[in-house]
Image (cartoon, rainbow, N blue to C red):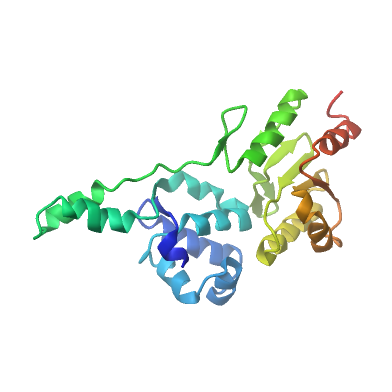
Amino acid sequence: MIERFTTKIIMDKDIQKKMFSEIILKEKLNQREFAEILEVSRRGLRQWMKEERKLPELIFERILKTFPWTIIYKNYVRGILPKNWVQIKGGKIRSKMKTNLTKRDRIKGFKNAKIKLFQRKAIGPNGELMYNVNEKKIAEELMRNDIQYKYEPIISIGKNYAVPDFIVGNIIIERCGFGNWEPYWSNLKRKIKRLEKYDRKYKIVVLVPSNNLKMVIEKLYNVKNITIFGEENLESLLNFIRAHGLIN
């Protein structure tokens, strides 16, 4: 179902293969564990690893959120194929060509398919490409209060890396819009524990939709050094930042 009805990303040759191999090696996963984390079949995972199929945008975004250090692979994304790219290539475009398609015609048909450029859904106040309007609202609220932030900075955690949504001074702000998806919350807990182990200077704030607040508190109840707020009331976040001397 994922393969058929979602957009696909276009990456440089062999990069998709390299990304999957590096995740398995770095996260010490086998294929079964990796497939469970992504909530896909092992067969589908193997096909993506061998670049036999293009990677759905949905799965790529899931990888970025689950393994934040993989954000470097965004640099190799060259575009996104629309949901109906197969029909565009094989139907509408071919219908305008000769019935007997030569190899050259087929290549031409593929190149003329409407390819949507890779982009996120919102632009932040500093021109950043953000995943959604919720992240944009957080950034705008920080800017309105003269709070300088960094969006998706890469920070080292021992031998690993983390890419939080925002950093303000020594405060990490994670905007978590996922619902009850266990692999995401397990990965977030691992990331927070690594931060606690390697660099205790950071204070971590988790912003979630208010309707998920109870669920998130239950998920993270035994995790130290975090504060959880509903994202609809950003005044709580501002008060937290004030309390740490980062805003007047």
Which residue is nearer to you in this view: 70 or 10?
10
> Which is more toward the observer, 91 or 217?
91
Locate residue 244, reporting x and y percent. Answer: 88, 34
Q: Is residue 62 left or right of residue 192?
A: left
Quarter of the rendering containing residue 132: top right
Up the image or down, 186 lies above or below 65; here it is below
- Residue 60 placed where, x, y %? 51, 56
Above or below, 126 against 202 in this view is above
Q: Quadrant of residue 213?
A: bottom right
**Left or right side of 18 for 177:** right
Q: How many marks?
A: 0
Does 104 sit left or right of 188 as displayed?
left
Q: Residue 160: tell me if it is visible.
A: yes
Residue at 38% x, 44% y is 116
Residue at image x 76%, y 55%?
A: 212
Location of the C terminus (image quadrant): top right
Residue lying at the far right in this picture: please name it. Answer: 243
Q: Is residue 233 above or below residue 39?
A: above
Instruction: Report if residue 148 is visible in the image.
Output: no
Residue under the point 75% across and 56% down: 194
| Residue drawn at point x = 79 percent, y = 58 percent | 216
Give percent across and percent down for residue 62. 57, 57
